[in-house]
Image: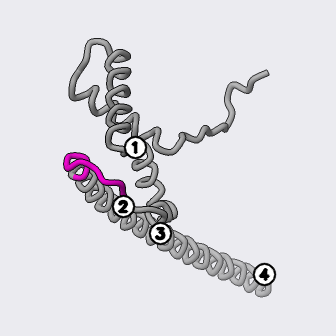
Amino acid sequence: MSIPFSNTHYRIPQGFGNLLEGLTREILREQPENIPAFAAAYFENLLEKREKTNFDPAEWGAKLDDRFYNNHAFKEQEQPVKCDLVQEMTSTSMKKEDASATALESSDDEKEKENAALKIQSAFRGHMAREEIKKMKDQQESGEETK
């Protein structure tokens, strides 16, 4: 029996997202008529390049992703020797990722500040409401005493 709406979350293997991004980018560039055949040729070409240069873009992409989480992947081993085109592409993408990471950090800081301000404002409003209720009770009690 299956549950139609469950909160199951599947984990994408490391490097798989980068492979699909590369494939998607090439499909958008080339606009092939037969996408499955193009994907098969793309992955065959990728395998040939990996065997010739001993450089695995999926592994490299997984290390780039891992870098943002725990920064241990780059300490283990040096980068493999790559061709100039791949080096240029990775340096450009790393610059973009560093800029986006900085933007994400600043947006996270902004969100934290907004949440802190919201908490302070709500605490103050609660304090003011309690003070007003206290005054109303005091007025009621003083009104009852005079009667």
Residue with the mark numbered 1? 56
Q: Nearer the viewer, residue 105 or 92?
A: 92
Question: Residue 6 placed where, x, y %?
Answer: 69, 33
| Disc 2 to disc 1, C-alpha distance | 24 Å
Q: Amino acid at mark 1?
A: Asp
Which numbered disc flags the more N-terminal residue, 1 or 3?
1
Residue with the mark numbered 2? 101
- Contact between labelled residues 3 and 2, with CB atoms less than 8 Å apart: no
| Label 2 CA crowd tier, 10 Å (few <14, some 14–19, many 20+) | few
Residue with the mark numbered 3? 112
Q: Is residue 62 left or right of residue 48?
A: right
Q: Nearer the viewer, mark 2 or mark 4?
A: 2
Indicate the quadrant containing the N terminus: top left, top right, bottom left or bottom right.
Answer: top right
Q: Amino acid at mark 2?
A: Ala
Secondary structure category for the residue under label 4: helix
| Disc 2 to disc 3, C-alpha distance | 16 Å
Q: Residue furthest front?
A: 52
Question: Residue 114 placed where, x, y %?
Answer: 44, 68
| Label 4 CA crowd tier, 10 Å (few <14, some 14–19, many 20+) | few
Q: Amino acid at mark 3?
A: Glu
Residue with the mark numbered 4? 144
Magenta stretch, residue numbers: 79-87
**84 inside magenta stretch:** yes
Q: Residue furthest top?
A: 33
Secondary structure category for the residue under label 3: helix
Q: Nearer the viewer, mark 3 or mark 4?
A: 3
**105 inside magenta stretch:** no
Question: Residue 117 placed where, x, y %?
Answer: 47, 73
Q: Nearer the viewer, mark 2 or mark 3?
A: 2
